[in-house]
Amino acid sequence: MTSKRKISASPLRRISIYVDEPELGWFAWVLSEAAEDLSTWSQIETTDEWVGSYKEAMAAGLVALQAMVGDLDRGPREDPPADAKKPVGTGFGFGFGAKLP
């Protein structure tokens, strides 16, 4: 049986987003990345600007995650091939936090 899976030259980074509530009613997004063994998570980025809703914080965090990814079709890679990068800003991507006309 042939597998549809391809072995990637650069592994997919395991990045998560969560929302923290530093003060009651104020929310901030946090990006964390798992170590290779998946047992340890390290904070890689957070916002200093708190917002008034969980939804707004999650949307802003997804925008920050999207900005870290050169090619949203391939996902965040440790060392993406130079020829595989798409120009950033060609579309919104995940679809959260978009400002509609």
Image (spheres, rainbow, N blue to C red):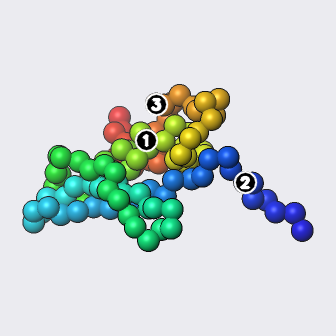
User: Is 80 drawn above or below residue 58 in the view shown?
Assistant: above
Q: Can residue 17 be seen in this view?
A: no
Mark 3 or 1, closer to the camera:
1
Please identify the quadrant where the C terminus is shown: top left
The answer to which of 57 and 8 lies nearer the viewer is: 8
**x, y percent for residue 33:** 41, 57
The residue under label 2 is 7
CA separation, marks 1 and 2? 22 Å
| Relative horizontal placement of residue 74, taking residue 58 as reference (left or right) | right
**x, y percent for residue 11:** 60, 52
Helix, strand or loop at label 3? It is loop
Q: Count the marks: how many?
A: 3
The answer to which of 38 and 29 lies nearer the viewer is: 38
Q: How crowded is mark 3: few (under 14 residues within 10 Å), some or many (20 or more)?
A: few
Please identify the quadrant where the N terminus is shown: bottom right
User: Is 58 drawn above or below residue 90 in the view shown?
Assistant: below
The residue under label 1 is 68
Q: Can residue 22 be seen in this view?
A: yes
| Relative horizontal placement of residue 20, taking residue 86 as reference (left or right) | left
Identify the residue at horizontal 37%, vertical 44% (top origin): 63
Q: Which amino acid does label 1 sit on?
A: Met
Name the N-terminal-most of marks 1 and 2.
2
Helix, strand or loop at label 1? It is helix
**x, y percent for residue 91:** 49, 35
